[in-house]
Amino acid sequence: VLASQLTFIFNRSVSSGTVPLQWKKAIVVPIHKKGKRADVSNYRQVSLLPCVSEVLERF
């Protein structure tokens, strides 16, 4: 059911060169690398994007 609707959105997005704003919003999560957890420099940022935008990126 979703495949035809996503195909339409993907094709329109590629032809117009734009991405829906909701697909650009990311949740930024700090991931601990190593060392003391209290030290802020021991973390790196990871952006979690909606899975639909990941599919479009591969398309």
Image (tube, rainbow, N blue to C red):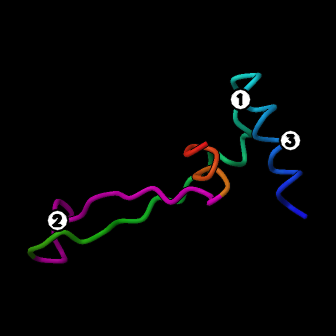
Q: Are marks 2 and 1 in contact (CB under 8 Å)?
A: no
Whether residue 54 sits left or right of residue 31 in the image: it is right
Rendering coords of residue 53 (x, y %)? 63, 49
The reply to whether callout 3 and callout 1 are in contact (CB within 8 Å) is no
What is the span of residues highlighted in magenta in the rendered image? Answer: 36-51
Q: Is residue 57 above or below residue 13?
A: below
Numbered disc 3: secondary structure: helix
Q: Residues within 10 Å of mark 1 (few under 14, many from 20)?
A: few
| Residue with the mark numbered 2 | 42
Find residue 50 and report its horizontal and vertical position in percent.
Answer: 62, 58
The one nearer the camera, 23 or 5, is 5
* Cα–Cα gap, marks 3 and 2: 43 Å
Please give the label number shown on residue 59.
none
Any mark on residue 14, and which? 1
Is 39 drawn above or below residue 16 in the view shown? below
Residue 47, position in %: x, y? Answer: 45, 56
Residue 43, image quadrant:
bottom left
Quadrant the C terminus occupies: top right
Q: Which residue is mark 3?
A: 8
